[in-house]
Structure formats: C-alpha cells, structure tokens
C-alpha cells in the first residue's frame, strides 16, 4: 500500500489502509512517521540454535569435525550464565535484523538435563521483548548420555538417562510455556525423528531399513509427553528417516503439529509422506540436497530458516532468504524464474508462521493479528530507487537497514536504537562468557589463522 498506515491497540493490529483513511479515525494515537520506510511483518526464524552466538568461527575450518568439537563443548563445558549471555547476544542480533519470532534449540544437539539453561536463555529474550520458542528434548544416542555440570564452579560428570531428559524437558515446559504474555513457548525437540541412523546426514536405503526398539520408544515417549502438555514438536530429519518413521504410524513424529528441519536427500516417496501427513518443513540454505521445489510442488509449504549462527552463519533472515533463492537458481540450470521475490518473502513470514503453527497470530499484517512489525529504512543509496518494494527487500535490503521493531504492540527498537536493553553491557557480558568457555574447553586449538595467500586450506 503506497502511503499506507496501520493502527495498533494493545498487542493487536486494528486498522490498515492509506494514511488519509486512517488519520481521521485514530486522532488519539501516538504516530510513528514512516515516510521513506517500508512496513512489513516481523520476520520469523523457525529454526536456530541457542549457544551458537558465542562460539562463532570455532572449528569453522574443520567442517568434518565440527559437531565432534562443538557438541562435547555444550555437554561438558557450559555454565548457566553462558545461556543468559548467549540469549542477550543472539536476541539483540535478531532484533536488529527485524526478527521478531525465533526458535532456539538448546545447543546443537538438545540438552534438557538442566532446565536452567533454557530458562536463562528465555529470560534474556523476555527482557529484550522478543518472541522465542525454546526447543528442548532428548539427545541423540547414546542413552544414557554423559554430561558435566558446573553449578558449583567445579565440573561434576554424570550420565543422564532418556527418562531424565524427558523429565528435564517437562520442567522447562512447566516453567516457560506461555509465559511473558504468551511470547515464550516451548516445543518438544528430539535431536532427530529416528535416532538409530545417521543423525546429521542422509542415510541410504540399505542403512535406513527398520525401526529399532529405541526408535519406537523415543517416538512413543515424545508423543505421550507432547499430548500431556499440549505442546508442538520440532526435530531434524534426513533421507531415510521419514520413510522409517512412517512404519510406526501411531507414534510417528510426522504431522501438522511438527516442523522438520533440513530433509536433505529425501526421496519422492518421503515427499509424498510429508504431503500426506501434513508435516511442516523448514530449510536452511544452501542445503543443496534438500528438494524444496519438489516439496512445494506437492503442496508442502517450506519456510526458510537461518539454522544460525555457527560456525559461520548469521541471523539476518533477508540475506539468508537471498541465499536460498540464489541456491535454487544455480541448482536448476541458472533458472532465475524460480522463487520470485514475493514467494521468498512469504517463506520468511507467513510460511514460517505456518511451520510453527502460528499463522493465525503472526506472519502477516492483518487486522486482528498480533502487532509484530518490522520497519525498514528505504532511504539508503543501495535501496534506490524506491519502487518495486518487495524486489528491493529481497534483492538488496540488509538486516542493518531495519529502523524500528514492534512486538506485541511494544516498540523494542526505534531509529536503530534498542530501547529495552543496555546493548554495550550485554555484548561485554557475552564476550566475557565466550572467553571463559573457550578457556574451560581449550577451544583455542580450534581458532585457526585465516589462510593468508592460500588457495586451499591444508593441515
């Protein structure tokens, strides 16, 4: 809407139209002048990782070893303060990039044995004023899983059973779900939907054959717990897992109450299963092995996520969306007609809200929906000329162009200034906690030189 306006009462949008139409109807309201700006729904990141903001670049040069370095770090060297610090830093990064709702998995592989981790992370998002979906659940194999706790300042190592992980997840749900006027939600999140096969990559048909008793037990207990607390589900899935999960139709971690991240290398049969069950799907680019065009052609709505932010990602949804579009162009013989800007914009707003089961509340600017709004300053040299605004948004806008952010009708950032949090103090605290973690876990060994003058990194 050219020269458009919207009106907010409380936490809801109550009117939308042109400025000329709205001004006489809302003479008692505070006015935010958006001349030269673009008003859009708050951006939604439906899959990211808590903890990652303070370990960026660690092991970035040893990709094959990254999970083997980072997961033990999360399971043996983090403290409760670390999670509050990461919440502040990641929340501020998202806020400044116009992201108003985000999912945060507690570590790379979910850790649920200490509910304080999730509670501290959510506390930071509550203070900033953002929406956050905390994702906790059972880890991948082995069960019981070794962990180390630092509550007393000294490491105390123990093994946590599957049932203790479920109990920890329930404690987080009880403490957080629906708090902060509903801005904080908890989704139950097992590491993958089938734990017995490859947890971070595709499994070929001769590897992904039959569900084990452990696979069936996880699905049954996750389903039971989700029904008990009335929460949604989230997990990762890769080739083979969807077909295997479908063998246990009663408890399969598939359906409209779950969104699955990645889906690398899935077969045509597995795409059909996702479509048949109404399972929601999210995708982090480049993810070249994810058949997102094939899924969408079968009616599956796919949202774009950051999977942020380590080892070398960010929480800028607009740059991430641009990468997703560019990757599809390259994959399909440089076909630049795929994923036009309007569709890409939907994939980080309304399609992402649909993935989270929140499409009736957020994801678009409509009367009656939550007042989650991002305002972009379009008066920048790289955004000229101001026409075809959705093209400008998807092709050129950066997260740093975001001017104002509103969540639940409350202004969190205006004119590029964060109003709810001392940014300098938060970043200093984050730096302090990151350095302390690096010292505890000896992460300096994984901080490599930048490879001056080299065309190929070797070790």
Image (cartoon, helix red, strand yellow):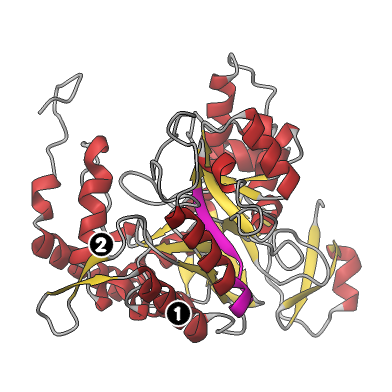
| Picture quarter with the C terminus | top left
Badge 1 is on which residue? Answer: 172
Badge 2 is on which residue? Answer: 74
Q: Foreground: 71 or 31?
A: 71
Q: What element carries label 1?
A: helix
Q: Residues within 10 Å of mark 2 (few under 14, many from 20)?
A: many
Q: Foreground: 393 or 27?
A: 393
Q: Is mark 2 on a helix, strand or loop?
A: helix
Q: How crowded is mark 1: few (under 14 residues within 10 Å), some or many (20 or more)?
A: many
- Above or below, comparing residue 193 to residue 133 in the picture: above
Q: Is residue 71 magenta?
A: no
Q: In this view, does 187 lie to the left or right of 342?
A: left
Q: Reading the chain from its start, which is encountered first: label 2 or label 1?
A: 2
Q: In this view, does 299 lie to the left or right of 201?
A: right
Q: Does the magenta stretch include residue 231?
A: yes
Looking at the image, which residue is at 44% across and 83% down?
171
Quadrant in the picture for residue 297: top right
Quadrant in the picture for residue 344: top right
Instruction: Give the Cα distance between marks 2 and 1.
Output: 18 Å
Image: magenta residue range: 226-236
Looking at the image, which residue is at 67% across and 58% down?
353
Quadrant in the picture for residue 290: top right
């Amino acid at each position: 809407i050219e020269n458009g306006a919207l009106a907010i009462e409380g936490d809801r949008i109550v009117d939308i139209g042109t400025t000329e139409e709205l001004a006489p109807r809302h003479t008692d309201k505070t006015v935010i002048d958006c001349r030269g700006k673009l008003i859009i729904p708050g951006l939604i990141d439906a899959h990211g990782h808590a903890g990652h903001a303070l370990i960026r670049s660690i092991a970035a040069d040893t990709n094959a070893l990254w999970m083997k370095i980072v997961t033990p770090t999360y399971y043996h060297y983090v403290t409760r303060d670390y999670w509050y610090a990461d919440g502040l830093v990641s929340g501020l990064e998202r806020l400044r990039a116009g992201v108003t709702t985000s999912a945060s998995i507690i570590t790379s592989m979910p850790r649920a044995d200490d509910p304080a981790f999730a509670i501290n992370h959510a506390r930071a998002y509550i203070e900033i004023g953002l929406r956050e979906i905390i994702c906790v659940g059972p880890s991948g194999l082995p069960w019981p899983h070794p962990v180390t706790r630092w509550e007393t300042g000294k490491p105390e190592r123990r093994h946590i059973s599957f049932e203790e992980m479920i109990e920890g997840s329930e404690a987080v749900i009880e403490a957080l779900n629906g708090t902060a006027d509903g801005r904080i939600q908890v989704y139950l999140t097992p590491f993958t939907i089938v734990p017995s096969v490859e947890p971070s990559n595709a499994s070929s048909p001769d590897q992904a054959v039959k569900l084990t008793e452990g696979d069936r037990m996880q699905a049954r207990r996750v389903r039971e717990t989700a029904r008990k607390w009335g929460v949604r589900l989230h997990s990762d899935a890769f080739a083979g897992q969807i077909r295997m999960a479908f063998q246990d139709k009663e408890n399969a971690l598939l359906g409209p109450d779950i969104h699955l991240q990645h889906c690398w290398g899935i077969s045509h049969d597995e795409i059909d299963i996702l479509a048949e069950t109404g399972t929601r799907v999210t995708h982090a680019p480049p993810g070249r092995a994810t058949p997102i065009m094939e899924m969408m052609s079968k009616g599956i709505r796919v949202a774009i996520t950051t999977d942020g932010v380590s080892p070398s990602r960010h929480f800028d949804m607009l740059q991430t969306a641009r990468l997703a579009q560019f990757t599809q162009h390259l994959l399909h013989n440089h076909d630049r007609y795929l994923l036009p800007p309007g569709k890409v914009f939907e994939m980080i707003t309304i399609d992402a809200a649909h993935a989270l089961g929140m499409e009736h509340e957020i994801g678009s600017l409509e009367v009656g929906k939550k007042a989650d709004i991002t305002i972009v300053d379009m008066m920048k040299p790289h955004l000229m000329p101001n026409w075809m605004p959705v093209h400008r948004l998807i092709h050129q806008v950066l997260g740093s162009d975001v001017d104002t952010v509103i969540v639940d009708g409350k202004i969190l950032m205006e004119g590029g200034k964060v109003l709810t949090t001392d940014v300098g103090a938060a970043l200093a605290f984050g730096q302090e906690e990151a350095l302390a973690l690096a010292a505890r876990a000896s992460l300096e060994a994984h901080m490599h030189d930048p490879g001056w003058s080299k065309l190929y990194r070797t070790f």
